[in-house]
Image: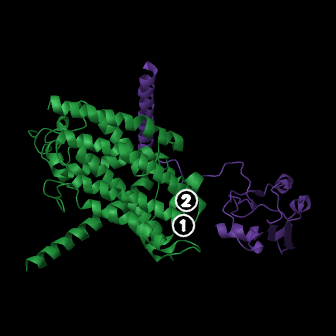
Chain colours: A purple, B green
Amino acid sequence: MAGYFTNILSGTKSLLVGLSITQKEFFKKPVTLQYPWESLEMTPRYRGHIQLIKDPETGSHKCISCGMCQRGCPSNCITIHSEKQEGVKGKVLVKYELDFTKCSLCGQCIENCKPSAIEFSKEYNLASTRKEDFHYDLLKRLKEQK
Amino acid sequence: MDLGINVIEMLLYLVAIIGFAAINAAYLVWVERKGAGHIQRRTGPKEVGPYGLLQPLADGAKLMSKQLIIPAGVDKPLFMVAPLLAMVPAVMIFVTIPFSENLVARDINIGLLVIFAFASVNVLSLLMGGWASRNKYAVISAARAVSQNVAYEIPLLVMTITIVLVSGSLNLREIVFSQAGAFWHWNWLPTNGNFLGPITFIMFFICYLAETNRAPFDLGEAESELIAGFHTEYGSMGFGLFFMGEYANIVIGSALIVILFLGGWYSPFPEVVPFLGSAGVWWFLLKMYLLIWLVVLIRWTFPRVTLWSLLNLSWKILIPFSLFNLLASAGLVKFLG
C-alpha cells in the first residue's frame, strides 16, 4: 500500500517535470529555417554544377579553350566552342555548354583544368519541368553574374 | 413595447455569445498551433497577417468555400445533424456562464445542471457523426468516445455534487459568491474549510480533460491510429463545426473550473491591495486563459494513453475516490460547517 501512494507521488512529479520542460522550450528561439526567405550557407565541399571562375584581375574567365574538360568528361556533357580572333593569342572561348542532366558531379573536368578556370558552384535551388532548362551556357552565366 | 425591448435584448445577447464562442474557438486553434510550434522549436503559423493572426479567418474562409461532400451510403439526416449538435450545445452553455458579478446572459437558478445537461449532448453528436459516416474508423472512434465519456461523466458529476454540497447552491453566481475573497478562500485550497478541495480540483481537472476529448485522452480522434476518428468523412464546414465545438468545449470547461474552484471573478489578492485587489471580469478571463494554456501545454507534452488504461483510471481510481470524496465532504459539511 505504501508503494501505491509513492507511485502516485513520483508519477505526479514526473508529469510536472515534463510540463516544465515543454514550457521552457516554448520560450526558446525556434531553430527551424524559413526556407524560401532564409537559407543556409552551403558547405565548402558541396558540389553543384560547374561554373567558370571569375578572375579578379581581368574581370573575365581564365579558360584557354584547351578542351581537356570536354575530353575528360565520362558522360560527355561538356561542349566547348572556341574561335581564333584577330590580335588575340590562342583560341577564344565563345560558348561553354554544359548538359547538367547527364552530369554525375565526378569532378574530372575540374581535376583536368590546367589554368583552374572551373569550380563547383553552390547552386542547389534547381527545379524545372523541362530538361532544356538544365542545358547551361556557362560563359553566358558568368557574364550575367556581373 | 416591453416585448420589443426584450427581443432586442435577447438578440444582442445571442450575437454577443455566438461571437464570443466563435472568436474563442477560432483563436484557440491559433494559440494551439502557435504554442505547439514554439514548444517544438518551430514558429507555427506566421504568413497570414502579423504573427499569423489572420490564419483562423483564412481557415474559416477556406472551410466555408469548400464543397460539402456527402459520401455514398451515409445516413444522410444523422450525418448532417451531427456537426450542428456538436456546436449548438456549446453555444447554449455560454448563456449561463457568469463572467463577472453582473455579466451573465441568463442567471439561471440551476445553472450547473443546465451546463451538464447540454454538455452531455456532445457525446451524442460524436456517436451520430461516427455511426452515420459508414466508416470503420469512425465507428471505432465513436465507440471509444462514448465509453470514455460515459466513464468520465460519472466522477465529473460526483465531484460537482461535492462542490455543490460545500457551497450550497446550483446557481453559478452563488457558487462564486461563496468563494469571495483572495485565493485562500477559493475551493481549490484546503484553507477554504474544505480539506478535500485540492483532491477534488485535481480529479475534476483530469475528468474535464477526458470529457473534452483532449490529449492525453484524445482516443476519439487518435490521428495516428484512426485517421481523425469520428470526423474522418467530414469536410468543409461540417468538419469546421466539429472543430469549433471541440474548442468551445475547452473554453466552457475552463470557465467552469474557474467558477467552481478558482473563485470566478475575484482577485487572488486581498481587497486591501490597491488596483490588483479589485474583482472583475479580467480576473475571470485571465484565470480561464491560463487554464486553457495549461490544457494546450498538456496536449503537447504527454503521449496518448491506451484505451484500457484510460478506462481503468476512471472505473478503478476516479470513481471510487470521487465517491469517497463525496462522502467525506458531506461529513465535513455536516459536522464542521
Contact check, label 1 and label 2, Cβ < 8 Å:
yes
The residue that appears at 74% across and 61% down in the rendered structure is: A51
Callout 1 amino acid = Ser
**Residue B213 placement, left or right of B323:** right
Q: Is residue A36 left or right of residue B28?
A: right
Residue at x-position 21% and y-position 68%: B13
- Say which quadrant the C terminus of chain A sits in: bottom right
State the image coordinates of residue B166 (x, y, percent, origin top left): 19, 39
Dot 2: chain letter: B
Q: Kindly identify the residue that appears in the image at 43 percent across and 67 percent down.
A: B83
Callout 2, which amino acid?
Val
Q: B178 left or right of A145?
A: left
Residue under label 2: B139
* Horizontal and vertical percent position of residue B154: 36, 45
Element marked by disc 2: helix
**Nearer the observer, B27 or B323:** B323
Would you identify the image quadrant in which residue B323 lies? top left
Q: Which mark is residue B133?
A: 1
Q: Residue drawn 82% across and 69% down? A: A92
